[in-house]
Image (cartoon, rainbow, N blue to C red):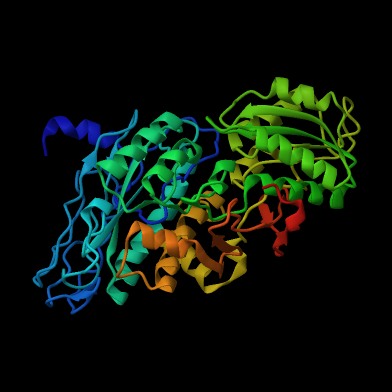
Amino acid sequence: MNPRLHPLLSKIAAVGCAAMTVASLSVIAVQRAEHRPGRTVNVAAGSGTGNGSYGAGSSGGGSAGGSDVNGGSGPATAGGSTAAGGTGGGTTGPAGSTSRGGATSGALSDGATGGGGGGGGCSDANANEGIYCDHIVVGGTTVLSGPLAVYGEGGLKGGQAWITYYNKVLAPQRHLRAIKLVYYDDSDDPNKTLQFTQRMVEVDHVLMLTGVTSPGAIKQYLEAKNVPLIGDIGLSPLSYQSPMIFPTAIAQVNTFPLRVKFAQEDYKIKSFAVIQDVLPGVDDSPFKVAWQKAAADFGVKETDYERIDSAGNSCDQQFLSAVNTHPDYIFMPTASTSFLACIRSMRSQQVKPGGHSPTDPNLLGISGGSNLQIEVDQCGDLCKGQYSAGSPFADPQVIGTPGAKLYLQNMQQYASGVEVSQFIALNYYHAGWVIYNLFKNAGIENNLSRPNIIRAANQFGPFETGFGNSIQWTAQLPRIPSLCMFRVKDDGSHWVFGTQRECLNPSQATT
């Protein structure tokens, strides 16, 4: 390696392989003092030999090259590890490469190819769409620096856990192509999201996207190029309004009436105020409409609506405005940074829920946060007994399904240190499982193309994922995969998930 490149590569917070599931990864903020570089993982499918096939053609009995998981820490290297194509005349994809991108890090393709057999011929190879006989190329953007980085890392490692398992176990067993990821750190800048998406489609030639931080910024581009985005967690209302975007979770606007329902059931509230966190580049007018509709549907009054940046570290003005309207309940931000900023404002203004506040005895309860342990630890007694913003997923440590058990096993093995109940990490692990089943159920594993993927996705489900959520996609817009979520309550030491999936009446949904 050129020694002059080493310092630069050492700064790239990358993990060599995460595919099919990763990309959006972090779309909400958490308080963060610094960005820790991620581990470098080079993944190829299993090293065993066999007469497996890629696509329609069979291999000539060649061995799948490549190495096992290298979980050690250290700088990311250009190219990672690439499997030998075998001796059966198959096409071997290009070696992994590092593309410079973003303010602080570039795109690192994991270099993972292989798949458990030789590189036999296939009928659907199309380099312009990232389809090779031994691997496919997918892409996305994420956030690996700044206050959003902890979510980005958590989601990235969730994606790593799935793709490592897929490339090491499922691909060799089923003689499937491995997955190769190209991703860029867009620093949660919508302009960079668009710039890098254009590069992934026109230069990196990805088959599809698996998530980005700002789907609204690339909606028109995806539609013009007919490139599908599958796996987006859907924190932008525009994620549900595009024929090219297939989100995996309940729309955030449809969680609002459920949150009002929970507050009304527990506290008999007659009024509420909202401090809504908003990501860069997101139009929050649909949020305002959804909160107003929720108030009308449940017969309560919305006293105030305040906007705060998801990464905002001061909530004094927003909290003071909200509390001065004397609501029974305050819906706080989801993002940890802005949520904890509002908690600090509560303390400084001596406001305490439960009718114990000398400055606002009307306040019965609050709701906010994203199920991270740091929120419970820092919020303390102010949050005990209060709800977070909820989760589209059941607690994987409790649900006991085969998929959840495998998730816990893979996270322990390949992504230790990640909070397994974090819904960002859960989404980008389970999105890989969803896409795997999308291809398998449609019978297109050996007949891949962007049009075939879009056609299959437009008639997918209902699909019970095994993570507590069900997904259904159709061609009709808005595309609503689910109207269900789980309550999550602070018991004073941890976030505790409800065991029942609670669903919104379709008539109460915001479309």
Q: Residue at x 44, y 65 (%)?
A: 456
Direction from residue 511 to residue 206 in the image, left or right = left
Count of marks, rendered view = 0
Q: Nearer the viewer, residue 212 or 360?
A: 212
Q: Nearer the viewer, residue 269 or 224?
A: 224
- Residue in the image at 39% along x and 31% along y: 192
| Quadrant of the rendering where the N terminus is positioned | top left
Q: Is residue 35 left or right of residue 495?
A: left
Q: Residue at x 42, y 29 (%)?
A: 191
Q: Is residue 389 above or below residue 170?
A: above
Examine the rendering and report whether any part of residue 465 can be seen: no
> What is the quadrant of residue 464 in the picture?
bottom right
Of 315 and 194, nearer the camera is 194
Which one is in front, 371 or 112? Answer: 112
Residue 360, x across and y down, in percent: 88, 28
In the rendered image, residue 190, in percent from the top left (x then y), is placed at: 45, 32
The image shows residue 283 at horizontal and vertical percentages of 60, 32
Above or below, 511 against 198 in this view is below
Location of residue 35 in the rendering, given as x and y in whole percent from the top left corner: 41, 34
Q: Residue at x 46, y 49 (%)?
A: 155
Compared with 180, 374 (above or below) is above
Give the quadrant of residue 34: top left
